[in-house]
């Protein structure tokens, strides 16, 4: 991603901000620059401080992207959870291009590291089958593509991902290793401890209890295995469970 000055200006208005000298150079942060021709139809600028050139897309996922005019339509289709086949057919682009764009967008999303979470915050882990594609020393029986392993939940052959979100859509998704979740992995996922006043909602995993005790925050346990889905009318982990489904 671009430097902090880019993050403060939405991409739709970033060019106008640069033209009005309200933006800054993504290389050095300077605000002394001038127009310096065009780059494939996009206005280019040259910084007087560092001497480097840039455009409104420098440092963003669209920097070397062709067909930038399709980005808005692509993101609309992506938000509707359309498949890559449907997106490539609707926009008349190659399926590999649709795949690459999706991953560029996902990599560019800034995740919260814990400090800005507030209020009711949900956290839960989910598991993915570990891929050993290309391995010449497979330590297990091979499975068909897309097939699942034996059993549900944690195992050394499954990848663990922690998903944390609050009710104002701050989000953190972190790969934390293989097998059963630990308190240290929760702490590493949220580099900045959840602030005082936060109410952490999770399942009954003891690691969440330990994390809440260490950081002196309220902890509400939701035991779906006991038929507990909502406590006191508004404590639940349904948002992160929905994110698990969408992520998979």
Image (cartoon, helix red, strand yellow):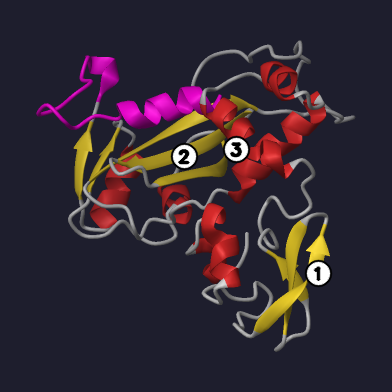
Q: Circle 2: is it few (<14), some (14-19), or many (20+) Cα within 10 Å?
A: many
- Percent position of residue 152, x then y: 51, 17
Residue 75 in sight here: yes
In reply to whether residue 235 is colored magenta, the answer given is yes
Tell me whether the residue at label 3 lies in contact with that at label 2, contact meaning CB atoms closer than 8 angstroms: no
Kindly state the secondary structure of the residue where label 3 is placed: helix
Q: Nearer the viewer, mark 1 or mark 3?
A: 1
Q: Circle 1: is it few (<14), some (14-19), or many (20+) Cα within 10 Å?
A: few
- Residue of label 2: 162
- Residue of label 1: 37
Kindly state the secondary structure of the residue where label 1 is placed: strand
- Residue of label 3: 72
1 or 3: tag closer to the N-terminus = 1
Which residue appears at 79% of the width and 52% of the height?
64
| Apparent side of residue 86 relative to residue 17 in the rendered image (left or right) | right
- Percent position of residue 180, x then y: 49, 35
| Apparent side of residue 186 relative to residue 48 in the rendered image (left or right) | left
Q: Quadrant of the C terminus?
A: top right
Q: Circle 3: is it few (<14), some (14-19), or many (20+) Cα within 10 Å?
A: few
2 or 1: tag closer to the N-terminus = 1
**Residue span colored magenta:** 223-248
- Comparing 41 with 32, the one in front is 41
The CA distance from mark 3 to mark 2 is: 30 Å
Q: How many marks?
A: 3
* Residue lying furthest bottom: 49
Q: Nearer the viewer, mark 3 or mark 2?
A: 3
């Amino acid at each position: 991603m671009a430097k902090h000055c880019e993050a403060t200006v939405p991409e739709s208005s970033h060019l106008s901000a640069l033209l009005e000298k309200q933006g800054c150079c993504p290389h050095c942060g300077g605000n002394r620059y001038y127009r310096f021709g065009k780059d494939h139809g996009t206005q280019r600028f040259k910084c007087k401080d560092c001497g480097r050139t840039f455009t409104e897309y420098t440092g963003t996922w669209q920097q070397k992207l062709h067909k930038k005019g399709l980005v808005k339509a692509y993101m609309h289709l992506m938000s509707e959870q359309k498949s890559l086949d449907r997106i490539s057919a609707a926009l008349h682009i190659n399926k590999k291009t649709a795949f690459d764009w999706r991953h560029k967008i996902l990599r560019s999303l800034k995740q919260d590291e814990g400090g800005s979470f507030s209020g009711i915050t949900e956290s839960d882990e989910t598991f993915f089958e570990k891929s050993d594609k290309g391995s010449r020393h497979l330590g297990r029986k091979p499975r068909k593509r897309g097939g699942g392993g034996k059993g549900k939940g944690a195992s050394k052959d499954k990848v663990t991902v922690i998903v944390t979100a609050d009710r104002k859509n701050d989000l953190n998704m972190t790969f934390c290793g293989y097998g059963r979740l630990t308190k240290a992995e929760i702490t590493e996922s949220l580099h900045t401890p959840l602030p005082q006043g936060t109410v952490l909602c999770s399942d009954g995993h003891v690691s969440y209890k330990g994390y809440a005790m260490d950081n002196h925050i309220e902890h509400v346990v939701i035991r779906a295995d006991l038929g507990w889905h909502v406590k006191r009318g508004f404590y639940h982990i349904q948002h992160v469970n929905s994110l698990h489904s969408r992520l998979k």
